[in-house]
Amino acid sequence: MGIKVAMITPWGVRCGIASYSRNLANALAQLGVDVYVVRWPRFGMRTAELIQSSVIDRIPADRVDLIHVQMEYGYFTHNLEVPFYRALMQLGKPVVTTMHVAGDPARDSVVASASKKVIVHNKWCAKLFGYKDKITIIPHGCDPRETPPRDECKRSLGIDPRAPIVGYLGFISPIKGLETLIEAMVEVREAGLLIGGGWHVGEETDYIARLKDWSLKLLPGRCMWLGYVPDERMQIVYGAMDVVVYPSRRMSESGALLTAISHGKAVIARRLPPTREKERLGALMTFRNTEDLVKKIKLLLKDEGLRRRLEEGARRYAESVSWGKVAEKHLALYKKVLSGDAVGEGEG
């Protein structure tokens, strides 16, 4: 009999954590783990009554061994994490929580007190969380894949295959820092800019519309916006990019960045603690400011050997954190929690 896990997570919506949970659940299933998905709403009002009706009443407590919560602060407004975890504990099953963001002492203390183990994706989040006896580091997974030939991908998007292309693909909001990328591209006159992505709901927001208008004025004839890109089109879009830039102003981890790495792309990301960790592993290159970004984009577009080495580093990193390997780490942790060996083991 395999381990049976109730995973509480957003599901079936445009959401990085929903995608993460789907990929993890599928990989766990390949290892014989039965995953019961218990949907926590990504949008709309959340109330104490919703905890009971949407979560507690839907957990098959008599048929699961363990409860795994995918936690993001925005899902628990108005201090709902307190009644949420209190209700979970009353079910009498061990709780594991994945913190997709950390650093709020009051909220983190609630999670730490209710969870047997807490998963974070990198050393930076482990430091922010602080409860060393509860922490296990399991990297964010990805699905290594090949892209079609670059020229073919560019042609399919109506782009001259001779044109160097710098790109971004992911959700678009002020925190993503696309203004920095657009400003940098003003100085990279030999290349075009390809932007894919949107918001969690709808086709466009007022912010995206303003950003699009601004970019088209600054980069006339050199900027293409694709809107939200479905999964089945990602290989074509990433395949058309010579260099991918992630200029997020802050991050705990980034599924979009990992997706670019999984496609074997040469990635430049803003220098933040999580991206510095990946840079030391050869998975990407970081930049400090707009001037530095301009310099590094030009360098990668000019130096094909360097770009290929960065692409190879991305592929090696992607293989090291493939969903199969990440699922194996989760399964090992579940077994420790259920055997009683996990508490007090420190960072994993």
Image (cartoon, rainbow, N blue to C red):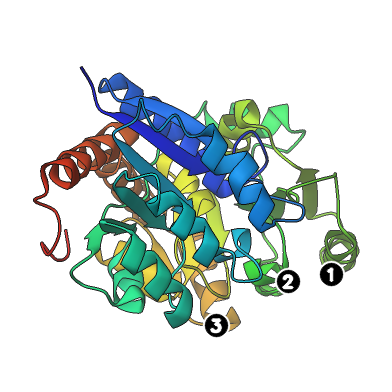
Task: In the rendered view, tell whether residue 319 sits above or below residue 111.
Answer: above
Q: Amino acid at mark 1?
A: Leu
Closest to the observer, 138 or 295: 138
Q: Amino acid at mark 2?
A: Val
Closest to the observer, 164 or 229: 229
Task: In the rendered view, tell whether residue 211 sits above or below residue 3.
Answer: below
Q: Disc 3 designates what residue?
A: 289
Is residue 146 in view from this perspective?
no
Whether residue 333 sits left or right of residue 101 in the image: it is left
Closest to the observer, 268 or 29: 29
User: For the C terminus, which image quadrant?
Assistant: bottom left
For the residues labelled 1 and 3, the Cα–Cα distance comes to 19 Å
Q: Disc 1 designates what residue?
A: 218
Whether residue 325 sits left or right of residue 14 in the image: it is left
Q: Are marks 3 and 2 in contact (CB under 8 Å)?
A: no
Q: Disc 2 designates what residue?
A: 186
